[in-house]
Amino acid sequence: MRLAVDATAVAPGAKGIGRVAKGTAEALAADGVDVTALVQADVALAAPIEAVRARPALLWEQVGLARAARRFDAVLTFTERLPVVPGGRFVVWLYELPARRIEQNRDAGAYQRGSDAVTRLLWKPSLRRASRVLAGSEATARELRTALPGLDVRVVYPGLDPRFSPGPGRGGERYVLHLGSTDPRDNTDAVLHAFALARARLREPVRLLVAGGAAGRVAEGVEFLGRVSDEELVDLYRGAAAYVDATLYEGFGYQPLEAMACGTPVVASTSTSTPEVVGDAAVLADPRDAGALSDALVRVLEEPGLVDDLRRRGLERAGEFTWRRTVDALLDGIGHA
């Protein structure tokens, strides 16, 4: 079987779907699968690649994917907007319902509103048409089954980049790490509030480092680092006394898993997919309750026995998310499509 992977989301510093697409293509190639990653210009992968024109997105989905489907036995894509022309065998791997993004884009510009209108029109017929629909978590699968009763959805978890591993990290003063972005679902304001409450109760001083695109109010003991490379992120995870995730919605939840893989104790959200990803290897708290987040953070920072247990369990849990397991699950799903 000749397989194409829609890896047009891969770009320098890409997170989320870009990271999943990159890992998928490279893992399939390493396993000996006849795979070609469809990428944007100037993107290099450890897999056979073919440069394509991927913008505007709608043109790529309706024309580029249709052409790929005529040339390959199957196309694995992460979009819910398949070509309207018939033909081709598509495997769609989703990490959230488009309705979630559309709701978030209510105040967006005209172009985004137009794109969302097309999504509303196409996403349900597209998933009905797909040869196979995969979900990145059971939480996402449940939402898909509710939105489209009778839809056959398989859960396939992505793998974890092996660079996220224990080792010496960022030195200096003691700190807690949080990753935020411009997406309000990252809930950075709640983390800032919880940290302020916790800091007043701690016996030893600690700072909060916020990495990523998030910007917030200047507060005592808080530093916004801006965007960081994966290499810098690994150092930050390894050196942190704790990692705090307060997401309101997550289709998979890479960040808590990456932190655990680096040996970092984690305070994680009880929302959507996060509990199924972290299992019993993190302290969970309601992301809408700053007091609960603060209590969890104080526990992790002041209970040595708990820290050691979380590190051990976190490494074990993160070790389950290998690309080897992902490839097996993907090939099984694609083979039965």
Image (cartoon, helix red, strand yellow):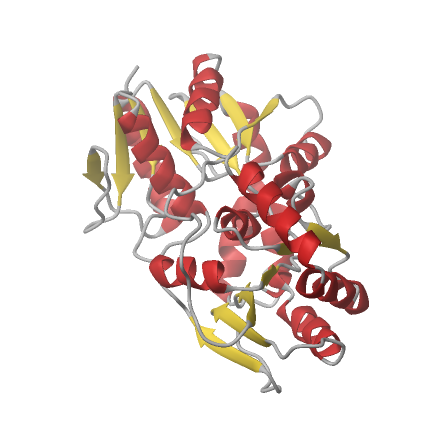
- Is 193 or 79 nearer to us in this picture? 193
Q: Taking 290 as reference, is 65 above or below it? A: above
The residue located at (25%, 48%) in the rendering is: 40
The residue located at (69%, 21%) in the rendering is: 150
Answer with left or right where residue 48 lies relative to residue 65: left
**Which quadrant holds the N terminus?**
top left
Visible in this render: residue 244?
yes
Quarter assignment of residue 299 = bottom right
Expressed as whole percent of the image width and height from the top left, the position of residue 132 reads 51, 22
The residue located at (45%, 33%) in the rendering is: 322
Quarter assignment of residue 188 = bottom right
Visible in this render: residue 97?
no
- Is 270 or 332 nearer to us in this picture? 270
Expressed as whole percent of the image width and height from the top left, the position of residue 232 reads 37, 63
Q: Taking 108 as reference, is 49 above or below it? A: above
Answer with left or right where residue 19 lies relative to residue 130: left
The residue located at (41%, 69%) in the rendering is: 227
- Is 15 or 222 nearer to us in this picture? 222
Q: What is the tally of numbered marks visible in this picture? A: 0
Expressed as whole percent of the image width and height from the top left, the position of residue 331 reads 42, 19
Q: Taking 140 as reference, is 34 above or below it? A: above
Answer with left or right where residue 12 lies relative to residue 251: left
Expressed as whole percent of the image width and height from the top left, the position of residue 27 reads 34, 31
Q: Taking 78 as reference, is 89 above or below it? A: above
